[in-house]
């Protein structure tokens, strides 16, 4: 059975050999919590095991596949706090996927630290370079090890029965035993490596895919190149050079050299293709940067974070630079910084008038400087909520200037008074400040800016919003009482750091249309944005065709929950700020929208939202003045065929998932819809539905499609199993696999859905 733990991987690699032997390192949770643990790479080269040196303590493990990145040195808040005690060359951080906490480690020597850093990176690289077949073999191998209770490298029928429960399938005992005896070629009463693989293949026989294969195969055994071309053209609706595409797929996915010589694809190759990125629901051509990046900033949706420093709730949550690192590492391009006066003349960042912990402003700026452009070269916007005195505002300006250097944009790009916002392409590698500014760009060029001026330096006021709604809870009353702000003065030094994103108070759309400048940014709480959307949707869209708008969560969301960002995108709002630390539908939608275009954090808005002379109202999307799309309305036909290896959600040993699939359409109000399949009793392993769902779509350019799998429960709320979301514009037609993600947005291979998609003109 194939495994990354094979001798090929470790042979001659001193780092991996050292990891296999094991090392004592300090696990660090805080400045005062530093405990020794024995860490060891397991023989499968996929699992890291560790335990306390004290006898009797339980051990812990984690998969190398769960590690997203390794940071060397003091690159976490925890390791920075002990920088005076342990040198950087002995420290490193393992960053896990999703929202799991980091693992901060200190090795006994710099050499040992490097062994683990280099070795783990090699293992991660090896995993990323695995083919689909190798990944499946590894997954089978992992299950074999889990079920082989006595570790003798064999499995008897009792162990197989336990395995089936672990793998989320309730199977008739007689049928399971028949498969077991067929696979037991040696007739030993147990299954060894190759026999177990045979058992797994019989268990996972894909009759649904075989049916499609045989429909296009002339002899039922293979697809000739001509057969494959017919399938690609007629079912997958592929364009371009179909002949060359078919040749490439055979070369890439066909495991049989004999079939390759015949320019043919066997069933195994066909299955590999359908399970690959090319066979997935997301068009691979739209994964990279494919959009025009030379338009003004206001023509893009921008991945944006709210109260980025918070790792938890809005009242008592932990503030950390880790929030900025994680958001930027996910492609976020607009982060928020709440600044207050701190001790010793150093500005601090926290959620004012609450019990959230505090961090230094300069540490936030350092983290942004280091991580801003690791995953995307397009500009980062620092959204400043400023509550500082003039003296500490000057310190803020000094830190921004000193730490960010040339990355901080302090002048217009060409040194002249601009007439429109620059583009993401123009601003590559630059950091922009969104904050209050003394005067405007015009005054800056005329040299008539005062040294400082009175004014409300912050553009957001959750306290006022809460007060307006007359809420009297104790924690809220305290914030209202303490939070009343007097007029503050704005320092020229900080004002000079603001160029293209001047924060302004919004009066109304008419006032904005007459008086506002293209570089001015208004911020709305979600409730205010909804009010404007209901009362003047077309005006809101028109406003956002000319300048940037930021929308942020209500002050009532003390649990850091999120609103539905789709509503705000429907109005063309660019900076729709969400609590990145909170999993759920809101962040699923954000991840789905920004999964396209290279995950660079910028997505070009539809043309009818970018042109000021157009009038688009999301409430009446079919009435688009001056805009006549080729297809006004479409219908999406979604046949949900089957599911594969859905994860267990209930820890009870005998519990098996009863899966159903819900398909949701998120878009303009007329397109909002959701439909469900039947639920399948006791089969999360290979459920089959063949249920067809149909959705009329009036505004396909703004539509998002979300697939949700749940464990049906007739007595209480269904349990979440997995999800996947993507823009309708990125969805491939034909027979496609949907590779499911966890609630946290991380992959859960090999869990998937098999669907058939067809998009037609509305009848």
Image (tube, rainbow, N blue to C red):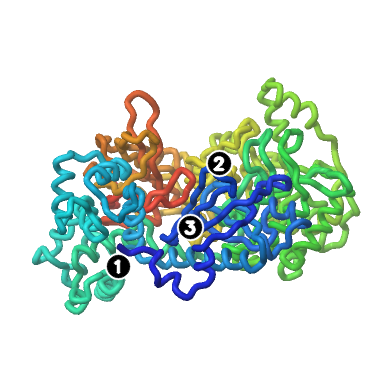
> Is residue 380 found left or right of 726 in the rendered image?
right
Q: Position of residue 177 (x, y in %)?
A: 16, 45
Does dot 2 land on a helix, a strand or a loop? loop
Question: Of tags 1 and 3, which is closer to the observer?
Answer: 3
Mark positioned earlier in the residue sequence (2 or 1): 1
Q: Residue visible at 79% across and 46% down?
A: 348
Mark positioned earlier in the residue sequence (1 or 3): 3
Tell me: residue 250, above or below residue 149.
Answer: below
Label 2 crowding class (10 Å Cα cut-off): few <14, some 14-19, many 20+? some
> Is residue 458 found left or right of 158 in the rendered image?
right
Q: Position of residue 195 (x, y in %)?
A: 21, 58
Check disc 1 and report the residue beneath it: 239
Q: Are marks 1 and 3 in contact (CB under 8 Å)?
A: no
CA distance for labels 2 and 1: 40 Å
Check disc 2 and report the residue beneath it: 582
Residue most toward the top?
A: 472
**Quadrant of residue 562 in the image?**
top right
Which circle marks residue 577 in the picture?
none
CA distance for labels 2 and 3: 24 Å
Does dot 1 land on a helix, a strand or a loop? loop
Question: Of tags 2 and 3, which is closer to the observer?
Answer: 3
Does dot 3 land on a helix, a strand or a loop? helix
Check disc 3 and report the residue beneath it: 64
Q: Nearer the viewer, residue 61 or 101?
A: 61
Residue most toward the left?
A: 219
Mark positioned earlier in the residue sequence (2 or 3): 3
**Residue 527 shows up from this direction:** yes
Q: Nearer the viewer, residue 195 or 511?
A: 195
CA distance for labels 1 and 3: 39 Å
């Amino acid at each position: 059975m194939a495994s990354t733990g094979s001798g090929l991987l470790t042979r001659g690699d001193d780092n991996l050999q050292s990891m296999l032997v094991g090392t004592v390192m300090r696990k660090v949770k805080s400045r005062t919590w530093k405990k020794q643990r024995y860490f060891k790479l397991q023989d499968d080269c996929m699992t890291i095991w560790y335990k306390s040196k004290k006898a009797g303590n339980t051990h812990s493990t984690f998969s190398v596949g769960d590690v997203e990145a390794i940071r060397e040195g003091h690159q976490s808040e925890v390791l920075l706090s002990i920088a005076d005690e342990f040198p950087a060359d002995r420290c490193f951080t393992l960053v896990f996927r999703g929202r799991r906490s980091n693992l901060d480690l200190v090795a006994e020597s710099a050499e040992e630290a490097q062994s683990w850093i280099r070795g783990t990176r090699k293992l991660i690289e090896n995993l990323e370079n695995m083919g689909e077949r190798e990944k499946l073999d590894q997954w089978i191998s992992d299950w074999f090890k889990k079920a082989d209770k006595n570790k003798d490298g064999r499995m008897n029928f009792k162990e197989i029965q336990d395995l089936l429960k672990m793998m989320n399938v309730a199977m008739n005992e007689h049928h399971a035993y028949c498969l077991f005896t067929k696979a037991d070629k040696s007739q030993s009463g147990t299954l060894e490596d190759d026999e177990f693989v045979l058992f797994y293949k019989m268990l996972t026989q894909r009759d649904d895919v075989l049916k499609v294969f045989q429909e296009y195969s002339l002899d039922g055994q293979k697809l000739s190149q001509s057969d494959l071309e017919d399938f690609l053209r007629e079912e997958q609706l592929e364009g371009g050079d179909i002949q060359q595409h078919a040749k490439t797929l055979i070369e890439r996915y066909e495991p049989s050299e004999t079939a390759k010589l015949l320019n043919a694809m066997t069933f195994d190759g066909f299955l590999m293709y359908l399970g690959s990125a090319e066979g997935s629901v997301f068009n691979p051509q739209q994964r990279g940067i494919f959009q025009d990046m030379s338009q003004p900033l206001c023509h893009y949706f921008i991945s944006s974070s709210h109260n980025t420093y918070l790792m938890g709730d809005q009242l008592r949550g932990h503030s950390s630079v880790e929030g900025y690192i994680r958001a930027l590492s996910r492609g976020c391009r607009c982060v928020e910084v709440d600044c207050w006066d701190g001790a010793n003349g150093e500005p601090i960042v926290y959620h004012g008038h609450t019990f959230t912990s505090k961090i230094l402003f300069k540490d936030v700026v350092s983290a942004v400087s280091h991580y801003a452009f690791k995953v995307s070269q397009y500009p980062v916007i620092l959204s400043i909520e400023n509550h500082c005195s003039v003296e500490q505002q000057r310190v803020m300006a000094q830190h921004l200037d000193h730490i960010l250097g040339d990355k901080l944009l302090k002048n217009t790009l060409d040194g002249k008074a601009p007439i429109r916002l620059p583009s993401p392409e123009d601003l590559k590698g630059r950091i922009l400040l969104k904050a209050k500014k003394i005067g405007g760009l015009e005054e800056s060029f005329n040299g008539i800016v005062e040294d400082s001026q009175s004014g409300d330096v912050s553009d957001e006021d959750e306290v006022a919003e809460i007060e307006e709604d007359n809420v009297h809870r104790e924690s809220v009353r305290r914030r209202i009482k303490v939070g009343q702000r007097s007029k503050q003065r704005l320092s020229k030094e900080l004002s000079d750091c603001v160029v293209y994103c001047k924060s302004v108070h919004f009066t109304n759309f008419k006032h904005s249309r007459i008086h506002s400048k293209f570089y001015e940014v208004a911020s709305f709480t979600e409730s205010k944005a909804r009010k404007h959307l209901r009362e003047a949707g077309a005006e809101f869209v028109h406003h956002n065709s000319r300048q940037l708008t930021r929308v942020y969560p209500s002050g009532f969301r003390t649990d850091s929950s999120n609103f539905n960002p789709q509503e705000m995108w429907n109005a063309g709002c660019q900076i729709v700020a969400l609590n990145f630390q909170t999993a759920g539908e809101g962040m699923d939608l954000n991840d789905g929208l920004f999964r396209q275009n290279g995950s660079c954090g910028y997505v070009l808005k539809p043309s009818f939202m970018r042109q000021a002379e157009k009038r688009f109202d999301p409430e009446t999307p079919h009435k688009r003045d001056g805009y006549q799309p080729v297809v006004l309305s479409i219908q999406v036909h979604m046949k949900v065929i089957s599911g594969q290896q859905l994860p267990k959600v209930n820890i009870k040993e005998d519990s098996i998932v009863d899966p159903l699939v819900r398909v949701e359409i998120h878009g303009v109000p007329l397109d909002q819809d959701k439909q469900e399949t039947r639920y399948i009793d006791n089969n999360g392993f290979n459920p089959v539905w063949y249920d067809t769902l149909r959705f009329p779509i009036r505004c396909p350019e703004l539509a998002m499609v979300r697939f949700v799998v749940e464990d049906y429960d007739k007595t209480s709320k269904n349990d979440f199993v997995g999800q996947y979301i993507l823009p309708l514009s990125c969805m491939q037609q034909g027979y496609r696999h949907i590779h499911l993600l966890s609630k946290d947005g991380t992959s859960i291979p090999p869990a998937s859905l098999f669907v058939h998609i067809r998009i037609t003109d509305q009848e």
